[in-house]
Structure formats: structure tokens, C-alpha cells
């Protein structure tokens, strides 16, 4: 989102969590905290946020569902940072940085 002073900040717009069978455990938009004068961009229209939960509620759901489970994703560090969420390192497999997935064409 672009702030009134012209600077830009990143905020999570939606999140999805699937299990090992690709069953959707959680899929939701996240209602952002929009400062006065800010305008949002990035392809998610404000109408998608109507009725969406706020970030703390989504993070609590994610933490409950992911507790003790392996998280597999691409760029997990950035995603977890955007969510303000931590997860044990031994339960993270990031396809962006894991040697088994790097430099594969």
C-alpha cells in the first residue's frame, strides 16, 4: 500500500494453509490496517476485505493449525515476517533456499 507521504509498505492480503493431501485448512483474506490517506494496491480490491478477519485473528488460527507441523513453501521467511509469525526452523522447508530445490530447471 502507498502511504500519504508516498512511501510504500507491504502487508499480507490473504493466506492459505493446506495439509499433505492438499485439503484446504484455512483460506482467507486479511483485513489490513489502512492508515489515513493511504491507498491500497496490489490487485486485492477493498471489497475483498469486507468482513475479513484482521491479522491477529488469522495469525492465531495459523499458529494453532501449524503447531508441530512442517511448513513447506516458497519464500517462507518473507511470508512469516509479513505475518509477524515465528515457526521452529526444523519444521520449515523453503523451496527457495533448500539445496534439493535450488538450481533446478
Image (tube, rainbow, N blue to C red):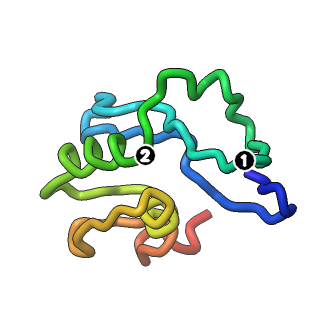
Image quarter in which the C terminus is found: bottom right
Residue 3 placement (x, y as % from top left): 78, 56
For the point 28% across and 32% down, the residue is: 25
Per the rendering, the mark at residue 101 is none
Judged by depth in the image, the label closer to the viewer, 2 or 1, is 1
Residue 97 against residue 75 in the figure, above or below: below
Front in this rendered view, residue 61 or 50: 50
Residue 50 placement (x, y as % from top left): 56, 22
Residue 5 falls left or right of residue 18: right
Residue 72 against residue 24 in the figure, above or below: below
**C-alpha distance separating marks 2 and 1:** 18 Å
Q: Residues within 10 Å of mark 2 (few under 14, many from 20)?
A: many
Residue 103 placement (x, y as % from top left): 58, 73
- SS at badge 2: helix
Residue 24 against residue 71 in the figure, above or below: above
Q: Quadrant of residue 76?
A: bottom left
- SS at badge 1: loop
Front in this rendered view, residue 96 or 84: 84
Per the rendering, the mark at residue 55 is 2
Residue 6 placement (x, y as % from top left): 86, 62
Residue 92 against residue 10 in the figure, above or below: below
Per the rendering, the mark at residue 36 is 1
Determine the residue located farthest toward the right in the rendered image: 6
Q: Quadrant of residue 40?
A: top right
For the point 23% across and 58% down, the residue is: 70
Residue 36 falls left or right of residue 84: right
For the point 44% across and 57% down, the residue is: 83
Q: Residues within 10 Å of mark 1 (few under 14, many from 20)?
A: few
Front in this rendered view, residue 37 or 14: 37
Amino acid at each position: 500500500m502507498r502511504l500519504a507521504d508516498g512511501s510504500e509498505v507491504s502487508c499480507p492480503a490473504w493466506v492459505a494453509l493446506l495439509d499433505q493431501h492438499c485439503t484446504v485448512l484455512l483460506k482467507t483474506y486479511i483485513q489490513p490496517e489502512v492508515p489515513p490517506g493511504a491507498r491500497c494496491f496490489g490487485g486485492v480490491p477493498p471489497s475483498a476485505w469486507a468482513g475479513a478477519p484482521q491479522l491477529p485473528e488469522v495469525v492465531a488460527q495459523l499458529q494453532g493449525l501449524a503447531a508441530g507441523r512442517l511448513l513447506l513453501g516458497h519464500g517462507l521467511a518473507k511470508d512469516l515476517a509479513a505475518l509477524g509469525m515465528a515457526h521452529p526452523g526444523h519444521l520449515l522447508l523453503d523451496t527457495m533456499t533448500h539445496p534439493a530445490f535450488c538450481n533446478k530447471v
